Amino acid sequence: MARREKGNGSISQRKDGTWTGRAFLGYKKDGKQFIKAVYGKTEAEVKKKLKALQKDIIKFSPQESVKLTMSELLDDWLYNIKQVELKPSSFDRVEITVNKLIKPNIGYLQVQSLTMQDIQQLINALNNQGYSYSYIKKVYNAINAVLKIAVERDYIRKSPCTRIVLPKQSQRRRSDIVFFSDDEVNKITASALFRYTTGRYKYKHGYAFIILLNTGMRVGELLALKWDNIDFNERQIHVTETRTQIVDRTDAEQKYTTVDQSTKTSSGNRYIPINKQTEEALLYFKSLGYNNPYIMANSDKGVVTYRNLHRALSNILEDNNIDHGSIHSLRHTFATRLFKNGVDVKVISELLGHSDISITYDIYTHVIDEQKKKAIDILDNL
């Protein structure tokens, strides 16, 4: 009677009373399974031979199993697994990581010949070239994922992506976080809402910057915001989507197209209270009278783009001799002002849509430290 025991392959008794066992050892060059049979007078003898055979799998000639390069396996993982799992923008980032940082360095190597040293050398090289911890971690994660698949498919017995040492994750520097002072916020606000003597606004969509300063939304979230997301009665904005650029895979030249997609994480799907300044801005856009589902519209069918807002803010900063900052700095300014007014970090993290409060701590460490010092200084006046 044929039967299979975990780790022993398939064992059965033949008509002449002897026993045989079959073990799967991988794949041949044509992709077919590589099966080897052993024989013995007893079942115990066959089991012993199968165990010995499986221990010696690595000794079989490479010509007997599939010769698969890392590039081939990476492509299989990218386009048959990750492209199905990930949102288009997330997939684009993974694809860039694989094509730019992994394939040129180890893509030519056969999966079976890849060693821990090969992977470690790649990690070290990227670190020496100045790549951030985040980029290097993405490279490691991709390699680790495809090698796990190689083990599952029996291409290799054990993944060499073990005991790899990643560079230390340095804390985000204060200089990386740019925000505007209260005086600069006043200047930006005044310029964004400047009107000519005719009553016409200099910046038709200047109120967009007021919304960003008072909600902390990412610019992509604002551009994807629809009137259906606004509840004036409950005085809240429901953030559900973000606008982003992805590779246009219908175009042979791999151009980019703009799409709205769900927020990056479940925490990104959030409610933000509407204060007076935000309400004023929303009512202004409502008064434009466009028959357009999007708040950031420039006609019944047209919408405002990131380039439109970037150009307008650049002009505003230049007019006010502010030589630092970008649209994203408005988000940092929102968070920083809340910290300085004593708002709890957990509340700020939720308003920003961070997936974990540790992200908020990491980004705004300098602000939090300043608040701690002020809190201690208060004791001197008690």
Image (tube, helix red, strand yellow):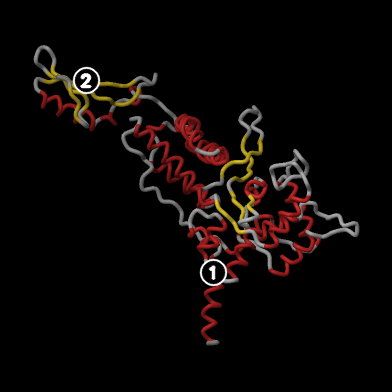
Q: Which residue is mark 1?
A: 368
**Residue 177, horizontal then vertical, whole percent:** 61, 61
**Alpha carbon of mark 2 to alpha carbon of mark 1: how far?**
67 Å
Q: Which residue is mark 2?
A: 37
Instruction: Classify 315 as above or below 253.
Output: below
Q: Amino acid at mark 1?
A: Ile
- 2 and 1 marks in contact (CB < 8 Å): no
Secondary element at tag 1: helix
In this rendering, position of residue 286 left or right of residue 95: right
| Mark sitting earlier along the chain (2/1) | 2
Secondary element at tag 2: strand
Name the residue furthest front: 233
Name the residue furthest top: 15
Residue in view at x 77 percent, y 58 percent: 192
Crowding near pointer 1: few (<14 within 10 Å), some, many (20+)?
some
Tell me which corner region of the image, top left, top right, bottom left or bottom right, holds residue 143: top left
**Residue 226, horizontal then vertical, whole percent:** 66, 46
Crowding near pointer 2: few (<14 within 10 Å), some, many (20+)?
some
Instruction: Please tell me which residue lies in front, 158 or 78.
Output: 78
Q: Quadrant of the N terminus?
A: top left
**Residue 317, horizontal then vertical, whole percent:** 76, 60
Instruction: Please tell me which residue lies in front, 277 or 49.
Output: 277
Instruction: Classify 130 as above or below 11.
Output: below
Instruction: Please tell me which residue lies in front, 325 or 308.
Output: 308
Instruction: Classify 360 as above or below 287.
Output: below
In this rendering, position of residue 160 left or right of residue 328: left
Q: Amino acid at mark 2?
A: Ala
